[in-house]
Image: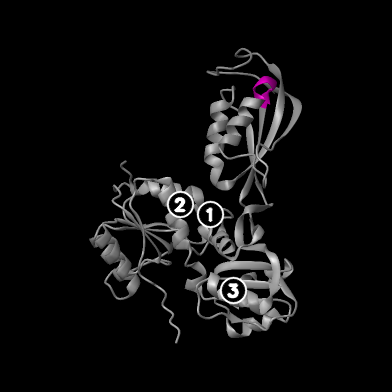
Amino acid sequence: MSLAVRDVVAYLETVAPPAYQENYDNAGLIVGSPDRTLTGVLICLDSLESIIDEAVERGCNLVVAHHPIVFKGLKRLNGSNYVERVVIKAIKNDVAIYAIHTNLDAVYRNGVNAKIAEKLGLLQTRILAPKRGLLRKLITFVPFNHADAVLEAVCEAGAGAIGDYKNSSFRSKGVGAFTPVGNARPFIGKTGESEKVEEERVEVIFPVHAERAVLQALRNAHPYETPAYDVLALENEFPEAGSGMFGILPEPVDAFAFLQALKGKMNVSVVRHTQPAGGKISKVAVCGGSGAFLLPAAMAAGADVFVTSDFKYHEFFDADGRIIIADVGHFESEQFTVDLLNDLLTKKYTGLLVFSTKIITNPVFYL
């Protein structure tokens, strides 16, 4: 099986669509040609110089990293800092670098926070702070006896999913009117003659990243030469994407017992935490990486503890005795992302060489 860089990129972007990333982020193919034939993939959190060396040693010409090596524009490439040196080394060795960052943080299924929730054994999980602006509504008008086929096509392309329900739609009856002119080739009626047709108004929602596929499916399945349709932007919350995750433990546990177990499950030697607020731990909020911005959401959800990283000294006071903040460290909170990506790629491509890095790229050490 011969694969190109673009094939792996395309697959990963079905898992974590680029539309889900934050506006400050730079996820995507950062270095390298998408047309290059793949020899192997090396997965890491941070694409450092040592990672490029490891990729070359293992015969991999694609590095899939969680963190983008380039966050802002580079005006020079003269090796004056580690970012420039990594990019130069990758180009010299024909190694492509792809980053899958806040878009992978955001997804409900197969995302960074879902992996943390799995490690902690959380049940009844949901996105802690769902994103808005990621949904669209398609409204189209179809002759009665073709509505089922059109709906089936657009739902197959990604429309009609609401939470755990699929093929969801609304249909109402009406009358469509038109007059074919010029070079029109009408499905119903004759050129130059006004026509009225009993139609169904069909409404379905879809995520913004599926718009092209949904509209193409509509055009292919619709009997009319030029189907009429509207696409409306929605401000509804999208339960499939957002920041953080919330879940419930199988059984309530003592706070110190939870914190002690957290060290083992997250494979850390230190947990910075606030004073336990009393009572048992049952409801848990998590956020891989820097999660202080989600503390109000975790508290509003009724979480007993918030597992994340990068809290500053004064931000710990914001717990205010209402919740336990458990800071496990940035690298530590995201370390299982490497396993997540490895599992996804090895299951998708059985013949592709996929390696998880052996290098610990955490810049923070503990005595």
Q: Position of residue 80 (x, y in %)?
A: 29, 76
In x, y percent, where is residue 181? 59, 18
Is residue 167 shown above or below 284? above
Alpha-carbon span between mark 1 and mark 2: 8 Å
Pinpoint residue 298: horizontal percent, then vertical percent: 68, 69
- Give the mark, 1 or 2, whose residue is nearer the N terminus: 1
Q: Residue tagged by mark 2?
A: 344
Tell us which disc is closer to us: 2 or 3: 3
Q: Amino acid at mark 1?
A: Asn
In this rendering, the answer to whether 303 lies above or below 13 is below
Q: Residues within 10 Å of mark 1 (few under 14, many from 20)?
A: some
* Residue found at the very far bottom of the displayed protein: 367
Circle count: 3
What is the span of residues highlighted in magenta in the rendered image?
Answer: 142-147
Q: Is residue 146 magenta?
A: yes
User: What amino acid type should be assigned to the residue bearing mark 3?
Assistant: Ala
Secondary element type, mark 1 = loop
Label 2: element kind: helix
Residue named by callout 3? 261
Q: Estimate the spatial distance between the alpha carbons at disc 1 and disc 3, rounded to whole Å.
A: 23 Å
Name the residue tied to disc 1. 110
- The reply to whether the C-beta atoms of the residues labelled 1 and 2 are less than 8 Å apart is yes
In three-dimensional space, the C-alpha distance between marks 2 and 3, rounded to whole angstroms, equals: 27 Å
